[in-house]
Image (cartoon, grey):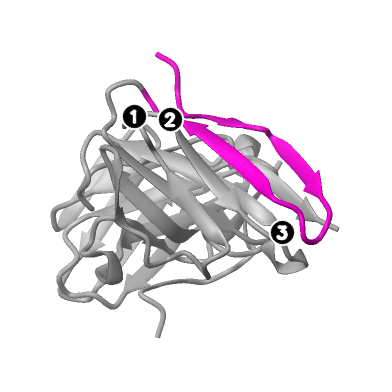
Amino acid sequence: QKEVEQNSGPLSVPEGAIASLNCTYSDRGSQSFFWYRQYSGKSPELIMSIYSNGDKEDGRFTAQLNKASQYVSLLIRDSQPSDSATYLCAAPAVGTGRRALTFGSGTRLQVQP
Amino acid sequence: GAGVSQTPSNKVTEKGKYVELRCDPISGHTALYWYRQSLGQGPEFLIYFQGTGAADDSGLPNDRFFAVRPEGSVSTLKIQRTERGDSAVYLCASSTRLAGYNEQFFGPGTRLTVL
């Protein structure tokens, strides 16, 4: 079992809709989670970090963490075509003493104009 | 301020050759990480440094790979006797401290192609 799992997509949503991206993780000891956005041919860009159960909002982005269910999600409100990218979920890697990150394979989001 | 920089942005080499990839972290970041990303996959950990020493090199695939950070800032990833399977994007990231809860910021990457 991979430490972090994501649906590869593509997830297609119309412009203006809410995009919901999901991630599950296996390490119950993980305390921090990160969402990165990666445009095609570019490197990952950190967009959200979350450390506590519940919701964390930043502009159009909301990260949700449910430690009991080992589930992290990212909501993008009022989706724009410029949000079309691959979204990577990451958590501290157990094998590195939780110092480096382990990533899911990413979910490709397509926002249709 | 300046972000993480990596050079070269692209490197094409022949099987069996030696390559060096350079990373310059964000100023003041003491922790530096190398990852490798293949098409359709998330980045995979290779090695990380806290200061000058390699704190964990357990992700390096074999002994052809080596990395240094002699002065605690710039790091070089070295690959000997390159193989076609080494072709990937090599990403460097830095953070303020070596801890999983610290946010890591990536450089633009070096795309390595081994012919």
Residue at image x 64%, y 57%?
Answer: B80
Q: Chain of mark 2?
A: B
Q: For the residues carrying marks 3 and 1, which lies nearer the camera in this image?
A: 1
At label 2, which amino acid type do we have?
Answer: Val
At label 3, which amino acid type do we have?
Answer: Ser
Residue B7 included in the magenta stretch of the image: yes
Instruction: Give a yes or no on whether discs 3 and 1 share a subunit.
Output: yes
What range of the chain is rendered magenta?
A: B1-26
At label 1, which amino acid type do we have?
Answer: Glu
Residue B109 in view of the camera: no
Q: For the residues carrying marks 2 and 3, which lies nearer the camera in this image?
A: 2
- Nearer-the-camera pick, B83 or A15: B83
Residue A65: image quadrant is bottom left
- Nearer-the-camera pick, A86 or B41: B41
- Nearer-the-camera pick, B77 or B5: B77
Q: What residue would you read off at disc 2?
A: B74
Q: Which mark is residue B87?
A: 3
Q: Could you say whether the residue bearing mark 2 is in a helix, strand or loop?
A: loop
Question: How many marks do you count on the picture?
Answer: 3
Residue at image x 34%, y 29%?
Answer: B71
Residue B40: image quadrant is bottom right
> In the rendered view of the protein, which quadrant contains the N terminus of chain B?
top left
First in residue order: circle 3 vs circle 1: 1
Residue B74 in view of the camera: yes
Label 3 environment density (alpha carbons within 10 Å; few <14, some 14–19, many ≥20)? some
- Nearer-the-camera pick, A75 or A6: A6
> In the rendered view of the protein, which quadrant contains the C terminus of chain B?
bottom right
Q: Which mark is residue B71?
A: 1
Instruction: Give a yes or no on whether discs 2 and 1 share a subunit.
Output: yes
Q: For the residues carrying marks 2 and 1, which lies nearer the camera in this image?
A: 1
